[in-house]
Amino acid sequence: MFDHAKIPDQQLVELLVTGCKTMDHTTDLSRPFCQFFYKEIKQIRASSLRQAQFDVCIHYFFQGLDNIDNHDHLIDLLRALSALVFENGTHTQRFSKPLSDTLIRFAHPSQPLEIRRMAINCIGNTCAGAGPRLQPLYKDFYACLLENICRVERTSQGNIMVAAHSLDFADTAVRKVASSTLRSLQFLLAQDKSLITNPLCDIVEIIYAFIFMQVSVQSYADPIRRRAMPVRQPQLSWRPSVKTILPGTSSESELSDSSGLVDSPKRQRDYAKIRINALLCLSAIARCAPKVFYTSWSKFIPDTFSLFFSNNSSSEKQLSPVYKSDNQPPSLFTILLYDPVTTVRIAVCNTLIAMLEGSRQYLSLAVESSKTKKSSFTSLSENLGSILHDIHKGITFALQKEQVPQVQSTIMHVAIVLVDNCSYQKLSPTHLPLLYHTLKTHWKEPGLHGSILQLMVCIFNTGQENLKELVGDLISLLLTSMTEDSWPVASVLTKNYFEETMPMFWNKLVDQHLPLSPGSLKFAETYSSAMIENKPEYVDWWHRMIENDLQQASTHEPSVRAAACDCFASISKDIFEGLEYRYQRLAITLLYPLASDSEANVRAAACRALGVFVLFPSLQEDSLFVSDMMKAILAQKEDKQTLVLVRSSWALANMCDAL
């Protein structure tokens, strides 16, 4: 049998184009050809089609969509068209008007559900990566998509959302349409952030309803009582009231108020896809319009959620394995802690990351109040402090409860972004120690070690005073198995807690040779930067460092050579003056050739180190050093790399000051 997978991409494109030129839509082969087109064009970047090739293909699909009445055939045509236009705004902008008219016609609620779904997918693929090229289409696409999950009424003043529209989620096709609509909305919102504040509707409220749909406020403690309850159809509206969208979530044993969902894996998968696509929409809003979305944080992470943690955790600070509502509004952490679908929990983590990234300025306003009772007025700072308190607590419980390594790693990424963007001066000092102790329980899990070390770097980089008592414990863990990923943690500990770190790391530095790697040399650089005084033991350490490690590093791989130069640049004036003369000359001799290294980063690092050395009193009066340094620096004045030019100019300026 002929294997078409071995055909080169360009020949396959020619084959598809030839098929579009010769294949009549009325033949029996038209549907199989559309299916073949969809399957193959997905494997090739459609944007790689030449203009003439793209034109032939899209005209073929337009012709079929205008003349074919068979539903199954229309579905195949729309599916193939969706693959053609995906992330292909360069070509689709020339057909924006006919494409928009065609897709909006087939995505209208009057069309059969599966045809609508294919047209909706096609709208999303058209918007994906299109940027401003298709800007004139976005408003119409937005209204069209919303019509499939809400009811839009057109008035003389424009399109407005006037009433709720209930969706029958008992129908699989309806669930698929809702999922596809949310997926397409995600692509659309990522291209045009003005839609987020569009008066057509409150898009955040719509997304909220989909994220927390099929969420019950009832306690799941009595499964017999739940089975005896009549099953009602879930109602979803664009502006849910407290009575229609009630807080609660899925758990390991109960996912929703519909027992049919528990019994039907297919329905469970459909709801999971809807929730994931709704979360992706929320992520798109958080990334495209973060300042607009800040006001909605409390909707998805209500500051009362700490009551849920209190009411659902044991005296040993362990979270209940089964969700029990206490009439608190649901949170993203409700889903993260209790949804049984792994991909949903990962989607929640990615949404939290999107919310927290770049929020440092906003989070700096947070103040964690010590008041136990809330007054009638809560300031923005206190409200934000309560939200951050709940986020820290939620992450800690999630790390304790989660069993899937992939989700655990993603939760740690959430924590990394959180700690990086938080200012802890006005927050409770207990957050970071609690997070540290939670991480420590996962220390021996090899798949999480890299993520744990990254988070440790963030935690101890805050320099929080009450973390000092944990430094010794962490160093003991590090020294049991120092890997390349461990060195950044050692560097941060040395930088922020030198007095606590020095005794424990000193034996490692003195009694053993450092493994030559960028991480270990960065640690040595950080350590030497803290050695300000001219103590005999510091001078002896530098003697060994220069003669053994740095001399060997100067002939190593580029990243190690650059790190060795940075290490030289970290030596203090007092310690350099205390070095024996031959070690001073050895250090200088090692640096000269590195200033003309083949790698730009090495040249830049060597120029910086020479710029530091020229400020040392003994070298300022050394005419031989000044002459050789001037030659080495001036040789880089024509360098094409900006970093090298900046560093060499800085070194030259230092030399001029010294002279």
Image (cartoon, rainbow, N blue to C red):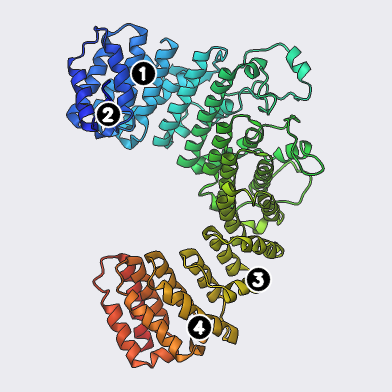
Report the front residue among 311 and 296: 311
Q: Residue 366 carries which label?
A: none
Callout 2 secondary element: helix
Report the quarter where the C terminus lies. bottom left
Residue for point 31% across, 31% down: 134
Q: How far apart are marks 3 and 2 (CA)?
A: 63 Å
Choose mark 4 or mark 1, whichever is in front: 4
Callout 1 secondary element: helix
Give the side of residue 256 with respect to residue 46, left or right.
Answer: right
Give the side of residue 37 with respect to residue 166, left or right.
Answer: left
Which amino acid does the dot numbered 4 rest on?
Answer: His
Instruction: Tell me which corner region of the image, top left, top right, bottom left or bottom right, holds residue 307.
Output: top right
Whether label 3 touches label 2, CB < 8 Å: no
Which amino acid does the dot numbered 1 rest on?
Answer: Ile
Which amino acid does the dot numbered 2 rest on?
Answer: Thr
Q: Which of marks 4 and 1 is nearer the N terminus?
A: 1
Callout 3 secondary element: helix
Q: Position of residue 323 (x, y in %)?
A: 72, 30
Q: Distance between the residues labelled 4 and 2?
A: 66 Å
The residue under label 1 is: 104
Q: Which of marks 1 and 3 is nearer the N terminus?
A: 1
Q: Which mark is residue 92?
A: 2
The residue under label 3 is: 504
